[in-house]
Image (cartoon, grey):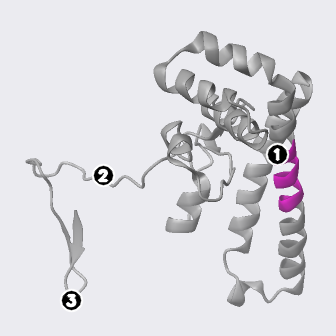
Amino acid sequence: YISFDDQGNCYAYSTQDVPAGYPLLVSYGDSTNPSMLLARYGFLDESSPATYCKYIIDDPDEAIKAMGYPERMLFYNDGGISSEVWDIILYEQLDKLNSPKKQQLYQAVMSGDEATKQSLHQENYFLTVKALLRHVDFLVNELDELDIGIEAQLKHGSHAQRHPRLPLLKRHNQYARTILERVQEKLDSMG
């Protein structure tokens, strides 16, 4: 771990021997969530292969967490969608319908029963695609609104003192928009 003394000196402690002159590296955590890296550390990693899909579940139950929420809820840079996104969206849709198949899906995911899982996905394909499209369309709309606000601040010119990170936020939003548009294209071609 790393600590600092009252004079501002930095001390790094290791659990193993480190040879003199060997570089020390610090992990910023999960590189598949550039939004978190921006919020926590103030930089944007545009080389990330994926980004968190920004699907928020109020008060997720233990089953949803066990299925990979939120850590594995990813949209890939090429427009791909992680299997966890498909599984959790379907699980939520089945829950809204009070369907007993919700438990069947959960059991299939947890036991690795791909045949049952795929059967449930095929049976509820359009339901899942529709829910995902609604989510992605909502996010793109939100980014449009945020961009309008950022542009207004940039035009006023007072952003440099009040909001010095606006250009970085604008870049982040464009990064997210690009991935979301690729996901939209993929979903549109499926539906």
Which callout, 1 or 3, points at the residue further toward the start of the chain?
Answer: 3
Q: Relative to 165, is 49 above or below? A: above
Between marks 2 and 1 in the image, the one whose residue lies nearer the viewer: 1
Number of labelled discs?
3
Q: CA distance from mark 2 to mark 1?
A: 36 Å
Relative image position of residue 69 (x, y in whole percent): 56, 44
Q: Foreground: 30 or 63?
A: 63
Q: Foreground: 23 or 83?
A: 83
Q: Which residues are magenta?
A: 134-143
The residue at the point 22 percent across, 73 percent down is 3
* Residue 175 is at least partly visible in this image: yes
**Quarter in which the N terminus is drawn:** bottom left
In the rendered image, residue 136 lying in the magenta stretch gets the answer yes
Relative image position of residue 116 (x, y in whole percent): 62, 14
Residue 26 disc label = none
Q: Is residue 183 left or right of residue 20?
A: right
Relative image position of residue 26 (x, y in whole percent): 33, 55
Relative image position of residue 39 (x, y in whole percent): 57, 67
Residue 25 disc label = 2
The residue at the point 79 percent across, 89 percent down is 158
Q: Which residue is mark 1?
A: 136
* Tag 2 and tag 1, C-beta contact below 8 Å: no
Per the picture, the main secondary structure of the magenta-coloured stretch is helix
Q: Relative to 120, is 103 above or below? A: below
Residue 6 disc label = 3
